[in-house]
Image (cartoon, coloured by chain):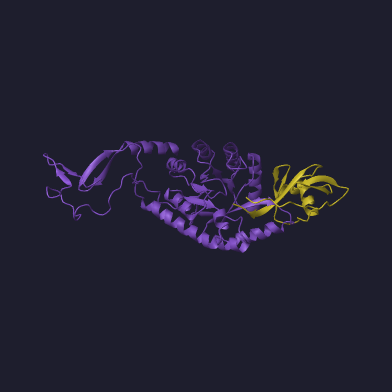
Amino acid sequence: MAGQWALSHVCRTMACQHWEMGDNLATFTLMNAFDPNRRPPARPLAFYGVEMGSRLLLGTALYPSPQVMSEAVRASRAGIVTVSLRREAARGKTGERFLELVKALGVHLLPNTAGCRTAKEAITTAEMARELLDTDWIKLEVIANDDTLQPDLFGLVEAASELNKRGFKVFPYTTEDLGAAERLVAAGCEVLMPWGAPIGTGLGLNNRYALRTMRAYFPDLPLVVDAGIGAPSHAAEAMEMGYDAVLLNTAVAKAGDPVRMAEAFAKALEAGRAAFESGLMEPREMAAPSTPVAGTPFFDIGPGNPSVKTGEDGSVEDRSVT
Amino acid sequence: MTVAPISREPAIDPEGIEVYVNAEPARLRPGSLADVLGQLGYGGAKVATALNGEFVPERSRATSPISPGDRIEILSARQGG
């Protein structure tokens, strides 16, 4: 997939692009230029063949109460919620009650391997999750460091390879590292979930350059920004970049009003995606008037205007502009 | 991320073998993993199990013997991000 991208990218950047400027048609050759005509694939978002009507994956942790969690999930219009596996201490009752609650939401369940430090721990947890939740989907987390909760990319690739062999559909929580991404795809992952920022920080899209690069490198692979989203504007930005979905938890659960915040995220995702599909304008360094210059009042070209000097060759210099 | 609650499993049989259930020491009558779950009150509960770090499917619990020092994990679904 990446090879195809590289070829098409070269073709794009070698091509001449035509830009209409006023009444003139000017021709430029742009190297390494963003292709403004590129549009996202028309097909709907799907994870492992399952079509998604929503671009939000929402976590179920940290809410003030189970009821608020349920209401927030509904308000967010999330299509998937994440759950974890933890030690049971109430003869199975706590887990059963929680399962009843999340199953009643009517959305897909995505169990995670949160807290796992090695590929082996993650694989065992994934097996337990598959039996318990009756799904072969797994959000694969192999954590390298307590302070950053950053993924251990070596353990991640190792676990993803084994889980894919065992028939799992892996959603790997990864970084923007393209080398690791290539290996995850080669291991059979059909979706990648790079972090926006470390889990729970709410810092947003910490490395925009790398996220943009990753999106461009895998134009047809479902990509989800997972972790670090702190505000609806962050989610909208991920959508505007062309990411397919976002996964978040704390930003909704720890909001003053989680249900209303969930609704705010739903709107931001809708707006951000619409913006991406509409084709955002190209940013530029210099100002460009949006109001037509032709017909500007109080502006004369000629000897009557002391601020305009007409040269012998007919060129005009406007001295009023400083 | 949620912090795992500290498990307080009862010591069922003072004369039994010592094992670790969710990292807590417990004395249990010897038997299979399925027997152990029954002793601990998990009979019929919706839980997933691992023995010494290896997943044990529900169908294999009755044929998985427990030995002294074994580490048994009993997990269920919880909130997660």
Colour chain A is painted in: purple
Q: Quadrant of residue A117?
A: top right
In the image, taking residue B60 as reference, residue A213 lies left or right, namely: left
**Residue A75 percent across, percent down from the top left:** 52, 62
Location of residue A247 in the rendering, given as x and y in whole percent from the top left corner: 53, 51
Work out whether residue A249 can be spotted: no
Q: Residue at x 53, y 39 (%)?
A: A184
Q: Residue furthest right?
A: B15
User: The C terminus of chain A lies in which quarter of the figure?
Assistant: top left
Q: Position of residue B16 (x, y in %)?
A: 86, 47
**Residue placed most toward the observer, B36 or A306:** A306
Q: Residue at x 47, y 45 (%)?
A: A221
In the image: residue A291, left or right of residue A145: left
Q: Nearer the viewer, residue A87 or A147?
A: A147
In the image: residue A124, left or right of residue A59:
right
Image quadrant in which the N terminus of chain A is located = top left
Is any atom of residue A16 visible in this view? Answer: yes
Count of labels in the image: 0
Residue A15, how many percent across, how many down? Answer: 30, 38
Q: What residue sits 71% from the left and 42% below the top?
A: B53
Q: Which chain is yellow?
A: B
